[in-house]
Image: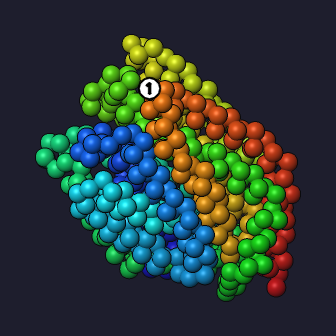
Amino acid sequence: MSPQNSRYRWFVVFVFFGFMLLHQMDKLLVGPLTPKIIEEFGITKTQMGAVTTGALIVGTFLYPLWGYLYDRYARAKLLALAAFLWGATTWLSAVVRTYSGFLVTRASTGIDDSSYPGLYSLVADYFGPGMRSRIFGLLQLSGPIGYLLGMVLALMVAPALGWGWRGVFYLTGGLGILLAVVIYFGVKDMPRGQSEPEFAGTEEMQKFEFSWESARGILKKRTMWFVFLQGFAGVFPWNVITYWFFTYLGEERGYDEGGILFTMAPVILVLAAGYFVGGAAGDWLFKRTAKGRIIVSSVGVLMGALFLFLAIRTPVEETTTFLILMMLTALFMPFSAPNVISTVYDVVVPEVRSTANSVQYFIENFGAAAAPLLAGIIADQTGSLAIAILSICTIAWLACFVIYLGALFFVEKDHHELRETLAKRAAV
């Protein structure tokens, strides 16, 4: 089946959704499994925070390399390699029997965490600018759904089967290796820039290759300065909530495992919907103004900060109010995610989009790598995970809101310049 076939591109989306779903499930399992891992190794919250921070650091420093490789070579084959590495390193983290060994092997799982820039840039060559945020939002549903499945697996299925946390990692690692085979043989690459409207009806697509001049041009786009800045602050809340919220619910709000599951399940489902709602809103407003995606992103971070503050400050006994406020937080939290990626593709030429995304993720993780460890330190020092979660999340999201206001001054100009560049290429 041809890569240009409309049905085939949805097959690719389906495969990549599976990749992201299982990968996120494996990655986010550490959250609900944290109490059991702390108990087995006899470690502190600070030491457990270091496990997650280690994986983030490894992934961070590999982003530029992965981005360069994705812009130079076949993205589908590199994604297959990433899936294999994810499966293999997850298995290794289940095998070790000491904290130091677990720290090293779990950190090694960060090697494949840098794979998403190639995935997104390949998908962008299957779908045009007018619907990219929706497609990215659809793919990013995999994160919260994977989180939910991981929570069910960790809190219900694994205990019922007597697996323990190691058995869970054996399962997810094996699925990663299986998916590597599917991607290697089932997913085809596309010419870079294929879906841009300027090349509609072109019989033979030009081949755009990575160049250092084009890569340097990323930094000439002032919109990207603000994209990079918001990335530094924007991932702090995600890592803090992902890796500490389960422990917070159990220790400070008194929820048992069943209470955690039935509280977080609806919250995560709303979070999943938020990706698509935010992406659809971004596409809708983008068709009316090039500022549309940035406007939707700024609303998301501001409302997310407001509702999280209200939720954490809700008394423990008011469980219904807490649930409603967390669901509202979850709705707005992911608004930025699909729109920021689409904004990168709205201003950057096709042959360096993986590199641009990789630089973005590098800066994001460079700041966010310290988030789980920082939260653990604050919690140990203050005796309160609530203080740690609330202080880090609200400060980071308010900073993102201010940064987005800056991006609004430049995004229209940068978008217009990209369209002019592509039009000139199409005319050759």
To which quarter of the image does residue 172 belong?
bottom left
Instruction: Write the residue at 76% across / 62% down.
Output: 347
Residue 241 x %, y %: 47, 38
Residue 377 x %, y %: 48, 37
Disc 1: which residue: 383
Query: Compared with residue 354, is residue 102 higher up or lower down, i.e. above or below?
Result: above
To which quarter of the image does residue 299 belong?
top right
Q: Nearer the viewer, residue 226 or 375?
A: 375
Q: Nearer the viewer, residue 428 or 61?
A: 61
Query: Compared with residue 31, is residue 184 higher up or lower down, i.e. above or below?
Result: below
Q: Residues within 10 Å of mark 1 (few under 14, many from 20)?
A: few
Residue 328 x %, y %: 53, 29
Please, which colouring scheme is shown? rainbow
- Give amino acid for label 1: Gly
Instruction: Write the residue at 36% across / 56% down.
Output: 103
Instruction: Write the residue at 43% across / 71% down.
Output: 82
